[in-house]
Image (spheres, helix red, strand yellow):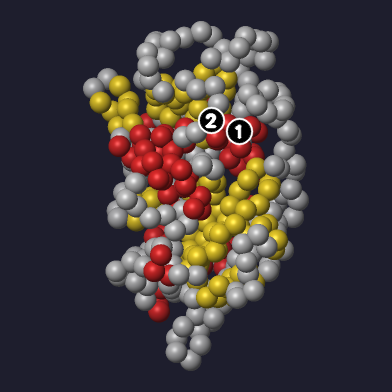
Amino acid sequence: MRSVSRLLFIALFSAVSCGNISAPEVVVPGKSSVKKEVVLTGPAFQFPTANHELLNDDGETNFFTATNPERPWTSGAFGCVRNSGTRLHEGIDIKCLKLDDDGEPIDMVMASRSGRVVHINRNSSASNYGKYVVLIHELGDLPIYTLYAHLRSVDKALNIGDLTNAGATLGTLGRTTNTNEGISKERAHLHFEIGVQVNAKFNDWFDHWYADGQNFHGNWNGMNLLGLDAAAILKRANAESFEMLEHLKSESALCRLIIFRLDFDWLERFPQLVVENDSENKEAIQAWEVDLNFSGIPVRMAPVRSKMRSGGAKYRILKVNGEVLKKHPCSGLIFRKGQQWVFTGKGQRAMDLLLYQ
């Protein structure tokens, strides 16, 4: 899953400063004008199992599966909820409702939204996700994935490339994984993610970084997937009309950086996230300012048209939101070195993946 000679200043800034800016059309290199988002009505995402307790008052205890009986339900939610807040959980763990005579789960797992099957792993030993399925969906032209993991079984009729309707059966909830500790019967759950793929060329990047490694999952390896808060999306999508573009833009930014590249994979796949700070300026684009959320998802991109020197750097941090950093100690992307903010080793690797061409 992946971290100028312009006057550099380090300052704290609010989430508002990172931006919910109304966006006129901007021409992205190699792309046509940015398309307006399609407003989705109804449940943009359905619950992937029959467990809908999340919609009930104080229903979280019956919806999320905690990491063990002594832990609160929050340990099964999204975010910095593992290892005393230092480890990120990119999905949500949904409790099973039905067991067979052997105490194994039998809940059906269903497609949360109409989409296309892009990956199936039927070999539980090949991933800590165990047996899992990934679907890709288009929401206002935004490519968004959903992932269904730890399945007891995958529907035998399901194949890569299949188009599925919302509510279609994908498999059975389970507890498969390749971790040493395994998952107990009591903790059987569906690990469910809604998120984005970092780079469509991940397979090539992996071969470059891990020459002796094995990637069994192509571009749908968990290293190339960044999750959003699926529980928050499910609640919103089942209570009101839902716009994924607006949801992405509402993500608080951890930092703002400048990227000295005119084009990169994310820019080509998510042009809707481009905003123009100066619509009157028609000078050529020199670089891009990019806001990253705490997990490294670029949630806003703005062209830089003033001339500047990179000093040989590929990118540089301009600002950091200290409140977001404090709220998300599991981020692990940046740290302060003297008077400057820099990327950690994890952050550098995330940036390398983001910008890989």
- Residue visible at 65% across and 42% down in the picture: 142
From this view, report whether residue 67 is shown above or below residue 7: below
Q: Position of residue 15 (x, y in %)?
A: 50, 31
Pick the front one: 228 or 31: 31
From this view, report whether residue 18 is shown above or below residue 157: above
**Picture quadrant of residue 118:** bottom right
Q: Position of residue 157 (x, y in %)?
A: 64, 74
In this image, 207 relative to 53: left or right?
left
**Picture quadrant of residue 273:** top right
The label on residue 264 is: 2
- Residue visible at 39% across and 69% down in the picture: 125
Mark pair 1, 2: CA separation:
7 Å
The label on residue 135 is: none
Give the residue type at disc 2: Phe
- Residue visible at 41% across and 14% down in the picture: 310
The label on residue 268 is: 1
Determine crowd level at label 2: few under 14, some 14-19, many 20+ residues with C-alpha closer than 10 A: some
Query: Given contact means CB atoms under 8 Å apart, are the residues at marks 1 and 2 in contact?
Result: yes
Determine crowd level at label 1: few under 14, some 14-19, many 20+ residues with C-alpha closer than 10 A: few
Pick the front one: 141 or 186: 141
Residue farthest toward the left in the current orientation of the protein: 338
Q: Is residue 13 visible?
A: no
Pick the front one: 276 or 115: 115
Give the residue type at disc 1: Glu
